[in-house]
Amino acid sequence: MMIPTEPIGSLPRSPELLGAMAEFQDGRLDAGALKEAQERAVRETVAALEAAGSPVVTDGEQTKPDFLSYPVAGTPGLSPGGAVIPFADGHQRQLPVLTSGPFRYKVSAAQYLRAARQHTHVPVKQAVVAPSALSLLYPAGGIVGYPREEFIHQLAEESEAEIRACLDAGAHVVQLDFDEARLSLKLDPSGQLLDDLVALNNQVLARFTEDERARIGVYSGPGADQASTHSLDVDYAELLPRLFRLMAGNLYLQLASEPDPDRVLRVIAGQLRPGIRVFVGVTDPTDPAVETAGQVRDRVLQAARHIPVDQLGTCDDAGFAPFADDTSTSRATALAKIRARIEGTAAAARTLGAGD
């Protein structure tokens, strides 16, 4: 009996890469040397995940500036001063704001996927930003000569093209990062904003066939940046039913950091329908303590009491460094947590398969 296990996406950038990025920003390193450092970081990250026994690898998002704005970084028509994401420890992240159209991606995640696949024969997963997240770039006051309806149409076109390019490039699965879902309930407790975000994601997902959607997943969590979260205090039970409306074959859900995982699992069980696999978080990137394989095994067995094993998978609660400058977790700690996830999931599978 096998239980699939996958990373969410990012790993802390290597010290060499962080140094190269800083030197490039200061004008002390040229673009060619930075690209070489990025390529080494991707190669080393893929090798480290393979060495940890990961059956599915990622590029660790080593060459992304962050998980959110990478498609549009450096494009015209964007200015600083967009929506603010407040974290529980007091730090903030701020999005850019769109000032003009048309809206186009400058970078497709397919290029990250192709680069990672050059270094491995293991299946490669590719994370992409959900269109719902990029919809937050459009200002509430609108843009003269560029209505929101036109922006949403172009955003959906760009998002579909990126997902399709990743599928065509051989992605094991394409994961949409819907990190703002839980946060939206803090911004709008009525749930209308969340409903609108889900509808936008489904507008894109509906363009794919059922077979294609089996290779598409959606990740949601309460944020994980500099060992802090932005919405862990929001009731998960308000979010989950809406997440299960998403037309994706896989859901990746934070769970290890939940104070009452059984309550969450009961809600998941009540929403689960055929054709969906739920990957539950069994390691917490915001906790500096490294989980043991035994702890992970027990968390998987707990989940299996609520979710049929053939619809169950495991993951980390979040990526370990969704923003390039996040050094709150070392690469060694992140990889140790990943090894615990892999070993603990395998141990749970053996327990559940005993006597088969």
Image: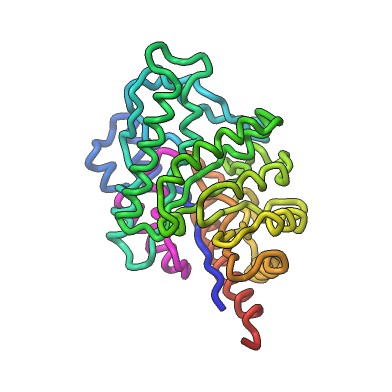
| Residue occupying the point 65% across, 78% down | 352
Note whether 201 is above or below 93 in the view shown.
Answer: below
Task: State which region is magenta.
Answer: 39-66
| Residue occupying the point 34% across, 31% down | 25
Residue 286 in percent (x, y) is at 62, 48
Residue 164 in percent (x, y) is at 34, 49
Q: Is residue 324 visible?
A: no
Q: Nearer the viewer, residue 215 or 59?
A: 215
**Residue 272 location, quadrant:** bottom right
The C terminus is located in which quarter? bottom right
Question: Residue 41: within the magenta?
Answer: yes
Question: Residue 84: within the magenta?
Answer: no
Horizontally, residue 222 falls left or right of residue 270, namely left
Q: Nearer the viewer, residue 307 or 106?
A: 307
Note whether 276 is above or below 132 in the view shown.
Answer: below
Q: Nearer the viewer, residue 333 or 260?
A: 260
| Residue occupying the point 77% across, 54% down | 263
Q: Nearer the viewer, residue 125 or 39?
A: 125
The N terminus is located in which quarter? bottom right
Residue 170 in percent (x, y) is at 32, 59
